[in-house]
Image: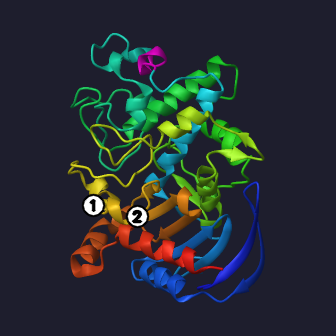
Amino acid sequence: MRFGGLATILVALGAFGATAAEAAGPACDAALHYSDARRGVSVLILKNGKPVCEGYSAQGGPEVGFEIWSGTKSFWGIAAAAAVQDGLLSLDEPVAKTVTEWAADPVKSTVTLRQLLTLTSGLTSPPGRAMPFAEAVTWPFKAAPGEAFIYGASPYQVFGLVLQRKLAAAGRPSDPLSYLKARILDPIGLKPTDWRRAPNGDLLLPQGAVLTAREWVKFGEFVRTRGVVGGKALVDPKTFDELFVGTKANPAYGVTWWLPRPSNTPLAPTAAVDLSLHASEVPSDMVVAGGAGDQRLYVAPSQGVTVVRQAYFTPQMVMAVRAEAKAGNKWSDAEFAKLALAAAAEAK
């Protein structure tokens, strides 16, 4: 099933209401074709809050949610900025202030929340698996804090434990998802289809969110408008800006967001989001939430553009996706971003 063209969707505090549809232009068709040819199930492009290109293929549809995998991570930088505004934490405080299990360790005791969320803490993770909060705390380090970019799930689960304990100490419901919903998702009218949890009930912060394109794009619009809803900033403005600053260890990754910055980090996740190799070809303020299987949320504030792209993917498909890339059908963020921006530019 595929719906090509312009679906006029009114955006008011993040809520969508579908009205008439109009024909797509050639740039929109090109973006849809590029996605479709690479397991794509949805593309939704907004210009200044109004949809200008929307298409679904294969298993996709306006009401069908798909797991966004590590695209989930980017919710927690925003949640951290909300927690700063609420006086619950600061990004540069030691994790050990809350996770006292790390307090006596000469390395772990120096790790900050910022280092957790920029994946520069030095903490390792089990391959392809997010674990309960208490288990994440026990994983070993393989680099000094701040020295290396180490992609994985453990840092986010440790942050989940920090947030859980901070909320409980403040007399609030301690589930991180309850906090995210109350502070961000509900105010912007975003309703996840699902959100996976660990077997013990702990939320999966680095992955697990299941969203339709029309829901995920609401989060992108929230970021495009700098976290302001109805004239009110829902997160700390200074911290919000800091989310989109890379680190010395990896300039192409900020606090849970990918950035179009050159990077010498050889790890596969940085190469997979190839904007670091084509930084001069896209707007310098573009930021990206990215997940396995080429799930993407692009936000380019200077262009007024927000884009969601989703694809069919399961962990069992890793080898098939690699074979797809070797056969010359590799996903390129830079190429798709240029197509999406062209689709937005052609809209009247």
Identify the residue under disc 1: 277
Which image quarter holds the N terminus? Answer: bottom right
Point out residue 320 in the picture as x, y percentages from the top left corner: 29, 73
Magenta stretch holds residue 98 = yes
- What's the residue at 64%, 40% (across, down)? 180
Classify 328 as above or below 125.
Answer: below
Is 327 or 348 nearer to us in this picture? 348
Q: Is residue 175 visible?
A: no
Instruction: Specify the amino acid type for callout 1.
Output: Leu
Q: What element carries label 1?
A: helix
Q: Is residue 121 magenta?
A: no
Task: Tell whether 32 sits left or right of 294.
Answer: right
- Quarter holding residue 214: bottom right
- Would you place residue 63 above or below residue 112 in this image? below
Callout 2: few (<14), some (14-19), or many (20+) C-alpha neighbours within 10 Å?
Answer: some
The image position of residue 304, as x and y in percent, is 59, 62
Instruction: Give the amino acid at mark 2.
Output: Val
- Secondary structure beneath dot 2 equals loop
Judging depth in this view, the residue of 304 and 46 nearest the camera is 304
What whole-number distance in Å separates the C-alpha atoms at marks 1 and 2?
11 Å
Of callouts 1 and 2, the N-terminal one: 1
Q: Do the residues labelled 1 and 2 touch (CB within 8 Å)?
A: no
Q: What stretch is highlighted in magenta?
A: 93-99
Q: In which quarter of the image is residue 348?
A: bottom right
Q: Considering depth in this image, is 131 or 63 the residue closer to the camera?
A: 63
* Mark number, residue 282: 2
Q: Where residue 161 appears, x then y in whole percent?
A: 50, 28
Q: Which residue is drawn at 40% across and 51% down?
A: 258
Query: Nearer the viewer's eye, disc 1 or disc 2?
Result: 2
In this view, the residue farthest toward the top is 104
Q: Is residue 310 visible?
A: yes
Task: Report the number of discs.
Answer: 2
